[in-house]
Image (spheres, rainbow, N blue to C red):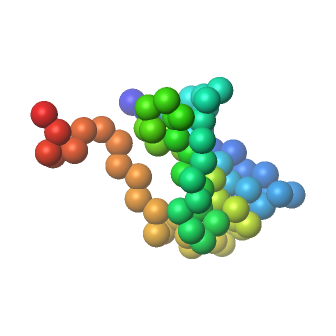
């Protein structure tokens, strides 16, 4: 089972979620609305995400879907 690590920094209003360990060589891509995807720079594989200006009542997580594993079209 994958471990998900969630970090919340209320003074910075920053929520960070990692479903894989952070990398030394990671990159970030803003998806819009303050949602940032964190990827392994070498493989391009998503490893986490950050939500800027996050407060516990934030509903942006309702709009984010993360699927892990092989897709039905993978062989």
Relative image position of residue 9 (x, y in whole percent)? 78, 52
| In the depicted structure, whether residue 46 falls above or below residue 11 | above
Relative image position of residue 50 (x, y in whole percent)? 63, 53
Relative image position of residue 75 (x, y in whole percent)? 13, 34
Kindly identify the residue that appears in the image at 35 percent across and 49 percent down: 67
When asked about the image quadrant of residue 32, the answer is bottom right
Kindly identify the residue that appears in the image at 44 percent across and 32 percent down: 43
Instruction: Please give left or right for residue 51 compared with residue 43 in the image.
Output: right
| On-image quarter of the N terminus | top left
When asked about the image quadrant of residue 69, the answer is top left
| In the depicted structure, whether residue 56 falls above or below residue 71 | below
Q: Is residue 46 visible?
A: yes
Point out the residue furthest to the right here: 11
| In the depicted structure, whether residue 16 falls above or below residue 31 | above
Relative image position of residue 28 (x, y in whole percent)? 60, 48
Kindly identify the residue that appears in the image at 56 percent across and 45 percent down: 38
- Label count reads 0
Instruction: Please give left or right for residue 35 compared with residue 55 in the image.
Output: left
């Amino acid at each position: 089972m994958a471990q998900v690590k969630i970090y919340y920094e209320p003074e910075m209003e920053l929520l960070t979620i990692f479903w894989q360990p952070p990398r030394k060589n990671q990159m970030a891509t803003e998806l819009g609305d303050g949602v940032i995807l964190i990827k392994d720079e070498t493989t391009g594989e998503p490893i986490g995400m950050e939500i800027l200006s996050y407060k516990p009542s934030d509903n942006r997580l309702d709009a984010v879907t993360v699927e892990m594993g092989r897709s039905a079209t993978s062989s």
